[in-house]
């Protein structure tokens, strides 16, 4: 299966690393910004994730990862992309620009048979590995999205607690690393809070991660909501969930459910369970979608439950994208 990446920013670069580490071969990338040389530097050296395990260099029309040559294009004109000439079967869309299915038609017009998108797209299956990825026939489905990083952290916790105890309603705050949607210092922006320095502030902002979870657990529609606080920490992030349960429970019962789900069944390797007193940097480069911090679990008056889960919003997420690409590869071998 020939793979191309569209957009070589945070997700595109890290997908390239994770895919390479897990044995996938990427044939081509498209990234309008930068020169081949600066893009190669950005792939090899990363402020958060450190140095790539192979030397990278750029030249006109190409990026080299060690002795592997990738075709490099640098266009914003989707009609000019070379996917057909290169025989690309699967596109990993990481530009953040394809918010709707129609935006992906240009890639399909080049003969691309499968697309995995790094942001939610309302008209296509919203897949959280370990929760609902079994619901899709990868031999037939042309486009899927890996939802959002926070949805991947939150959905397994919701699934386990809803199945085990019954969630009545919930409110979630994710304390999230900055992303390239923010500025380093104050700037003009339509969103007055995202206009402020990501280096200096805790910034309340929106996230639709909880409503996206209700696509996976539809019976909770209208009963979950979420907000994000962008924090000046690189990396990892922390999701703080408060749920009102249908019946009384205890810290031990909540933790036992989450621990069991982390050890067996579809969430093994996806949901983690940690009992040591750790901090955010201990979860950087963790490939799991979310890791429950068992020491933070609280229960008030039997039915109000708090659970906290850590996640590397970059590395965990790109590993889920690799999982989905592998599902396509297996279904279409
Ligand atoms: N960062 C995270 O933790 C995270 C986690 C999960 C999902 N996501 C989602 O993944 C998407 C990408 O996020 P990111 O953090 O990787 O953003 P990013 O670092 O800004 O990367 C996006 C890259 O795509 C490029 N691009 C823009 N238009 C393009 C086009 N027409 N063709 C090809 N490349 C184009 C951008 O260039 P310009 O800068 O010139 O626009 C940029 O280099 C977003 O939807 C985001 O919500 C992000």
Image: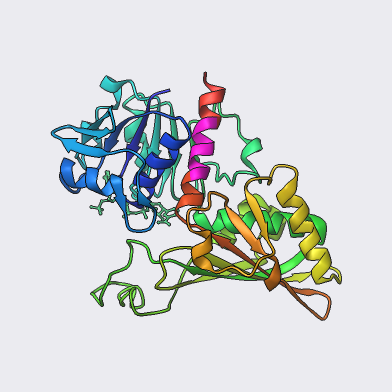
Query: Is residue 43 found left or right of 122 in the rendered image?
Result: left
Question: Based on the displayed image, in which of its 4 quarters is residue 109 positioned?
Answer: top left
**Residue 322 inside the magenta-drawn segment:** yes
- Looking at the image, which residue sits at the far left? 60
In the rendered image of this protein, does residue 214 appear above or below residue 304? above
Asked whether residue 208 appears in the rendered view, the answer is: no
**Residue 152 inside the magenta-drawn segment:** no
Give the residue at x 80% y 60%.
Answer: 256
In the rendered image of this protein, does residue 14 appear above or below residue 73? below
**Location of residue 202 in the rendering, given as x and y in whole percent from the top left corner:** 42, 79
Q: Main secondary structure of the magenta part?
A: helix
Nearest the eye: 80 or 307: 307
Quadrant location of the N terminus in the rendered image: top left
**Location of residue 248 in the rendering, given as x and y in whole percent from the top left corner:** 86, 72
Give the residue at x 84% y 76%.
Answer: 302
**Location of residue 20 in the rendering, given as x and y in whole percent from the top left corner:** 41, 35
Residue stretch in magenta: 319-326
């Amino acid at each position: 299966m020939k793979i191309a990446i569209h957009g070589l920013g945070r997700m595109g670069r890290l997908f390239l690393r994770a895919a390479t580490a897990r044995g996938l071969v990427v044939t081509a990338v498209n990234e309008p910004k930068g020169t081949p040389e600066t893009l190669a530097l950005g792939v090899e050296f990363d402020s958060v994730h450190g140095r790539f395990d192979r030397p990278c260099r750029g030249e006109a029309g190409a990026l080299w990862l060690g002795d592997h040559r990738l075709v490099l294009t640098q266009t914003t004109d989707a009609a000019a992309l070379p996917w057909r000439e290169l025989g690309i079967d699967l596109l990993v869309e990481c530009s953040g620009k394809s918010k709707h299915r129609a935006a992906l038609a240009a890639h399909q017009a080049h003969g691309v048979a499968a697309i995995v998108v790094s942001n939610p797209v309302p008209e296509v299956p919203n897949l959280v590995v370990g929760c609902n990825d079994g619901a899709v026939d990868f031999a037939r489905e042309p486009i899927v999205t890996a939802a959002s990083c926070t949805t991947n952290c939150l959905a397994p916790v919701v699934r386990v607690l809803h199945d085990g105890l019954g969630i009545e309603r919930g409110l979630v705050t994710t304390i999230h690393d900055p992303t390239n949607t923010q500025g380093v210092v104050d700037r003009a922006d339509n969103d007055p809070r995202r206009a402020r320095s990501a280096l200096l502030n805790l910034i309340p902002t929106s996230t639709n991660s909880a409503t996206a979870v209700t696509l996976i657990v539809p019976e909770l529609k209208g009963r979950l909501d979420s907000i994000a606080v962008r924090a000046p920490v690189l990396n990892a992030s922390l999701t703080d969930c408060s749920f009102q349960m249908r019946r009384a429970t205890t810290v031990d019962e909540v933790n036992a459910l989450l621990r069991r789900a982390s050890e067996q069944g579809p969430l093994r390797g996806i949901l983690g369970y940690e009992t040591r007193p750790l901090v955010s940097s201990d979860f950087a480069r963790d490939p799991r979608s979310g890791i429950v911090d068992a020491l933070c679990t609280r229960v008030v008056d039997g039915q109000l439950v708090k659970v906290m889960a850590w996640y590397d919003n970059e590395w965990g997420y790109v590993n889920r994208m690799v999982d989905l690409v592998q599902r396509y590869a297996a279904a279409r071998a």
